[in-house]
Amino acid sequence: LNIDTIMQYIDEMSLECEILHYMPWTLSVFSALEKLADDEQSCFSLSFFDGYKKELSVLGTVSGRDTCKIEDVHFHPTFIDGVPAFEEAKLVFIVEKIYEDSVKAENFIDTSLDEKWYPDKDYHHIYA
């Protein structure tokens, strides 16, 4: 599967994909942010859905500290090559990590965003 095929699929599905970066001179790279870093896994899944807007909104906005979001939206976890994904996904990529870092307070250009998004200083971990 090459990057042109992936982009065609994304266009056909009318998917919004803010996390896809294409570096034609080197690699096709996905980047993702997560709150709870799992440094044990060398891969992560990137899932694309056809529909499920309400459910995906819950997964993206509700804290997992207070409820089991996956059960709340009735998604069904599965594993692909040992990597967690969802049965409801139309397309799943298993992505190998090639870079990791953490969001840092000193890197915010608009410093008010640090306090707005991270009042507890529980920064996202970044993977590419």
Image (spheres, helix red, strand yellow):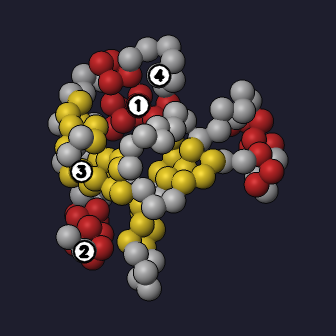
Q: Which amino acid does label 3 sit on?
A: Val
Circle number at residue 64: 4
Among the two numbered marks 1 and 4 on one chain, the one whose residue lies closer to the N terminus:
1
Identify the residue at image location x=40%, y=75%: 27
Kindly indicate whether the residue at mark 4 contacts the one at mark 3 (C-beta within 8 angstroms). Answer: no
Among the two numbered marks 3 and 4 on one chain, the one whose residue lies closer to the N terminus:
4
Residue beneath disc 3:
92
As measured in the structure, the alpha-carbon distance from the residue carrying label 2 to the one carrying label 3 is: 14 Å
Q: Is residue 38 left or right of residue 122?
A: left
Identify the residue at image location x=39%, y=43%: 41
Among the two numbered marks 2 and 3 on one chain, the one whose residue lies closer to the N terminus:
2
Circle number at residue 2: 2
Q: What element carries label 3?
A: strand
Q: What residue type is labelled 4?
A: Gly
Query: Residue 51 or 19: which is nearer the viewer?
Result: 19
- Badge 1: residue crowd in 10 Å (few <14, some 14–19, many ≥20): some
Identify the residue at image location x=23%, y=64%: 9
Q: Where is residue 85 in the image (x, y as percent from the top left)?
A: 26, 39
Q: Is residue 53 left or right of residue 35?
A: left
